[in-house]
Image: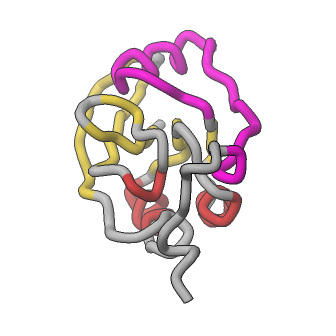
Amino acid sequence: MKISIPTRDGMVDDHFGHCDHYTIYNIENNIVTDKATLPSPQGCGCKSNIAFTLHEMGVTVMLAGNMGQGAKDKLNGCGISVIRGCKGNTDDIINAYIAGTVSDSGIGCAEHDDSHQCHEANKE
């Protein structure tokens, strides 16, 4: 199984579409067997081709901080399950996922505080 985490400075990036890169973990028999990075395309997740790219790489799970419904729908449409509300070091999050202690927060990008803006979505 391959799992992707939007990453910045070794931590889960709170905004999926603005991450620096994706950390891709390969898991076999509940053990991390490989860890790689994929540079993030520019723009919000719902406007990029990242869902298809991750699908082509064999990713089936996305552990994310927050993301908008459009990005979540694109990932789901490519067969990638999304778990939102993840925070902290990516290695710690992957170990928590393997241990079965990570669950979806149910909160999307629309739940950010008033200071948040998805700049790509707001362009006229």
In the picture provided, is 34 more to the left or to the right than 26?
Answer: left
Q: Residue 84's x, y, as percent?
A: 62, 37
Q: Residue at x 63, y 43 (%)?
A: 113
The answer to whether 72 appears left or right of 63 in the picture is right
Q: Relative to 100, is 121 above or below?
A: below
The residue located at (23%, 34%) in the rendering is: 9
Q: Is residue 26 magenta?
A: no
Where's residue 47, x and y in %?
51, 75
Is residue 3 found left or right of 118 in the rendered image? left
Span of residues in magenta? 85-111
- Name which quarter of the figure residue 122 lies in: bottom right
> Residue placed farthest to the bottom in the image?
124
Seen at 52% across and 82% down, the residue is 123
Quadrant of res 31:
top left
Position of residue 17 measured from the top left corner of the image (x, y, whole percent): 45, 58
The colour scheme of the drawn protein is secondary structure
Above or below, 122 relative to 105 = below
Residue 23, picture quadrant: top left
Considering every residue shown, the one lying at the far front of the view is: 114
Nearer to us in this view, 32 or 96: 96
The answer to whether 37 is drawn above or below residue 124 in the figure is: above
Residue 88: give x, y in percent of width and height. 41, 22
Task: Identify the image quadrant of the C terminus.
Answer: bottom right
> Measuring 49% from the left and 74% from the top, which residue is drawn there?
120
Residue 99 is a magenta residue: yes
> Who is closer to the viewer here, 62 or 1?
62
In the rendered picture of this protein, how many numbered marks are placed on residues? 0
